[in-house]
Amino acid sequence: MRFILAAMLGVVLTAQAHASCECRCVEGEMQALCSSSIDIAPICPATVCAIPPPSIAPIQPPQVAPLGTSECSPRQVLNPDTHRYEWRRLCN
């Protein structure tokens, strides 16, 4: 009984680890976007992404990068609801 409970807990914790990451088109390439630097990024499928329209990046006020990242920059990310690219601040 304990083994079954431990296995179920392991499955739930694994599912939660991937819940905050998703694959999106970023500037014409499929990439995993995670909400935390400690999340495990999924392997994204090879997909042909639309080319983002040319535009100038918005001016960003200086901000400190979140813990676990080294730098942040504005990038165009495809919104799956509107099928349009939107500017988002992404950190590495």
Image (spheres, helix red, strand yellow):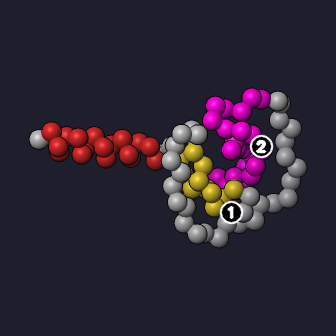
**Amino acid of disc 1:** Glu
- Give x and y (percent) for residue 92: 68, 44
**Amino acid of disc 2:** Ser
Label 1 neighbourhood size at 10 Å, few (<14), some (14-19), many (20+)? some
- Give x and y (percent) for residue 64: 74, 29
As drawn, the residue found furthest toward the left would be 1
**What residue is rendered at 53% in x and 51% in y?**
41
What residue is disc 1 on? 29
- Would residue 16 be seen by someone viewing this image from the given angle? yes
Q: How many labels does the image show?
A: 2
Q: In this view, does 21 lie above or below 44?
A: above
Left or right side of 42 for 28? right
Quarter in which the N terminus is drawn: top left
Q: Give the range drawn in magenta.
A: 63-92
Q: Is residue 69 above or below residue 54?
A: above
**What residue is rendered at 88% in x and 49% in y?**
56
Magenta span contains residue 61 = no
Q: Please tell me which residue lies in front, 51 or 46.
A: 46
Label 2 neighbourhood size at 10 Å, few (<14), some (14-19), many (20+)? few
What residue is disc 2 on? 73
